[in-house]
Image (spheres, helix red, strand yellow):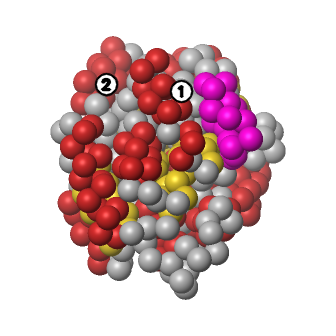
Amino acid sequence: MTGGFSGATQVAVDLSLAALHTPGYEVLLVLRRKPSTDERKIDALRQQGLQVKVVSNWLHALTVWELRKVIRDFKPDAMFAHGFSDHIWGRRAAAAEGVAHIFHVEHNSRERYTPRRLRQALALEPFTQAHIGVSEGVRTSLVERGFPAEKCIAICNGIDLTRFAQDAMPQLWQEREPAIYMASRFARQKDHDTLIRALAALRQRGLTPTLYLAGAGKSSLRARAERLVAELGLEQQVRFLGNVSDLPQRLSRTQIFVLATHWEGMPLALVEGMAAGCACVVSDVIGAREVVTPEVNGLRVRESDPDSMADALQRLLQNPALAQSLGTAARVHALSHYGREQMWCHYQRLLPVSA
């Protein structure tokens, strides 16, 4: 059970598809309807053989009531409730219907817990087998909030690596555009402003790479980013792409991937950039710092620091050998650590043998 089509939902989808292709498992994905719920995506999942139900997001009580009906009909042995505050309503419904194995999956290091929401989450503790953080940093944040340490574990997110096949990659680094790509929704969590200001700093140093910004999100925040681009005179360098359907192909044609952010859980977009063989630059925050080892498979920069970001980008733009080396190492790391099937294996170990 999860929300609309956020990063948390993508993880739930990937786990569901991996389980669907594992003998002995019957899988149902339940989505809580949100503005980002896309009927076309739901139809595409159903065409892959995945059962999908959508419940109301109007009132929390109605969400729980509809979930309880779904649970009574499906009779699951286990439920994984993903994301905030969806994990509260999912676990509440599962507990009320007597589901034997209930799991809470936390996807971010800074969720919007009010004292009331935290009490509601902790009240479900007796019915919850494990609290899963999508990175060690998220696991630590769960413990700090009062979730029992002995039940808090870390399982890293994974992605569908088949979308990043080697034969789709350019053979030569020089065949990639020496441009910068950031794929991220416009949200308070993300830090498009710092990246845009870093681009302005690079121009003052004589470097004018193209910056591609993919992703939707809040229109007001995108408009703010567009205004900043105009104020800094960067209209000829910055491309606002919106959502794109061919992200792996676009990344594989680009040299540099950036994740400028204020906080993370375990960023899927960063892993996708690494899997595409890009040289990656990330803000040094929880979740992201666990994925990138500085000078080995990417570069870390100080959060909200345009000069630090510009320095890292300048190094990569002026030193193609370094960029290629980091991109190659990033791809190797992503392929060996962040596959969807590898993630599913860790989740599968939590399930009863008869599930």
Q: Residue at x 41, y 53 (%)?
A: 94
Q: Is residue 114 left or right of residue 312?
A: left
Q: Is residue 45 left or right of residue 13?
A: left
Q: Earlier in the sequence, mark 1 or mark 2?
A: 1
Question: For residue 175: magenta?
Answer: no
Q: Which residues are magenta?
A: 138-154
Q: Residue at x 42, y 21 (%)?
A: 116
Q: Nearer the viewer, residue 341 or 319?
A: 341
Q: Is residue 302 visible?
A: yes
Q: Residue at x 44, y 30 (%)?
A: 120
Taking 45 as reference, is 197 above or below it? above
The secondary element bearing badge 1 is classed as loop
Q: Is residue 101 left or right of residue 296?
A: left
Q: Residue at x 43, y 62 (%)?
A: 13
* Image quarter hosting the N terminus: bottom left
Instruction: Determine the CA span between mark 1 and mark 2.
Output: 19 Å
Taking 338 as reference, is 355 above or below it? below
Give how far across and how far down residue 335 sits, in percent: 68, 64
Q: Nearer the viewer, residue 241 or 4?
A: 4
The secondary element bearing badge 2 is classed as helix
* Residue corresponding to mark 1: 110
Q: Which mark is residue 221?
A: 2
Give how far across and how far down residue 135 sits, in percent: 66, 43
